[in-house]
Image: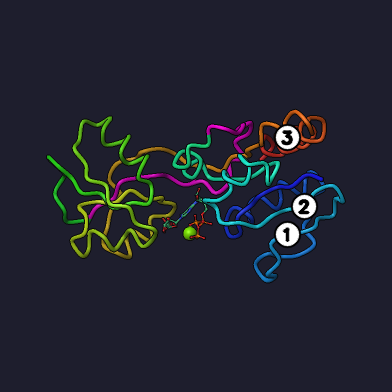
Amino acid sequence: MLTIAVSKGRIYDEALPLLAEAGIIPTDDPNTSRKLILATTRADVQLVIIRATDVPTFVEYGAADLGIAGKDVLIEHGAENLYEPLDLKIARCRLMTAAHKNAPPITGRVRVATKYVKIAEQYFAAQGVQAEIIKLYGSMELAPLVGLADCIVDLVETGNTLRANDLEPRELIMHISSRLVVNKAAMKMKHQVIAELLAQLERKVATR
Ligand code: PRT
Ligand code: MG
């Protein structure tokens, strides 16, 4: 049995057509079902539905053989004990700094609210900027509005969320997309079936 870890929402929605290419069609819809393990049209493949940030953990420990996770999540998690063989080019966005549209450019020490503590620390250190990072778990956009932080580090897709909160994107930190990750032991033990799946996904990604 091959177990694939996916989060519901945008990654699941965008991964479906790719998985279908490999004959993997879930028999339940995680958006309406409460099942956490989904059978698929392939008897040898099941999906486990977990939080996006938990995907690297499940795959590292071998609780899932494969997973689909955003590059943001993989970097922030560390994800050193798994393979990342394929950029699926789905759930694309940009990791950016953002500040109030009327705020002056940042000089000197800066307070940054984000859930991407590691990435933010590395980014500001590389810029030679002294940053105090404040870890949040959501609603980062609020931080500059209530004086919690000078700026935020968050994902931006259309920019609508920033605009709706009188913020504006400032600096691009990196482009983000979702990656296929593979447990190291599974890559050896289930090599043939994983290699075949990889090839199918790779072909589909290339023709999009
Ligand atoms: O939502 P939940 O708390 O369960 O977990 P999650 O937020 O980690 O999961 P999910 O499904 O929201 O995101 C999973 C992955 O999708 C992320 O790790 C990214 O790799 C990728 N992704 C792509 C995004 C976005 N685009 C995105 N726009 N993840 C989040 N957003 C959010 C962003 O944080 C901001 O709040 O959407 C808002 C900005 O969107 P725009 O279009 O208004 O700019
Ligand atoms: Mg979310």
**Between disc 3 and disc 1, whose residue precedes?**
1
Q: Which residue type does callout 1 highlight?
A: Ile
Residue drawn where x is 71% and y is 41% of the image: 65
Quadrant occupied by the C terminus: top right
The label on residue 186 is 3
Q: Residues within 10 Å of mark 1 (few under 14, many from 20)?
A: some
> Are circles 2 and 1 on residues that touch, CB within 8 Å?
yes
Structural distance between the alpha carbons of marks 2 and 3 = 15 Å
Q: Identify residue for label 2.
A: 46
Q: Residues within 10 Å of mark 2 (few under 14, many from 20)?
A: many
Q: Position of residue 86 (x, y in %)?
A: 63, 34
Structural distance between the alpha carbons of marks 3 and 1 = 19 Å
* Magenta region, residue range: 80-99
Colour setup of the view: rainbow
Q: Is residue 92 magenta?
A: yes
Q: Nearer the viewer, residue 81 or 40?
A: 81
Name the main secondary structure of what is drawn in magenta: strand
Q: Identify residue for label 1.
A: 37
Q: Position of residue 82 (x, y in %)?
A: 60, 34
Q: Which residue type does callout 2 highlight?
A: Gln
Residue drawn where x is 41% and y is 50% of the image: 155
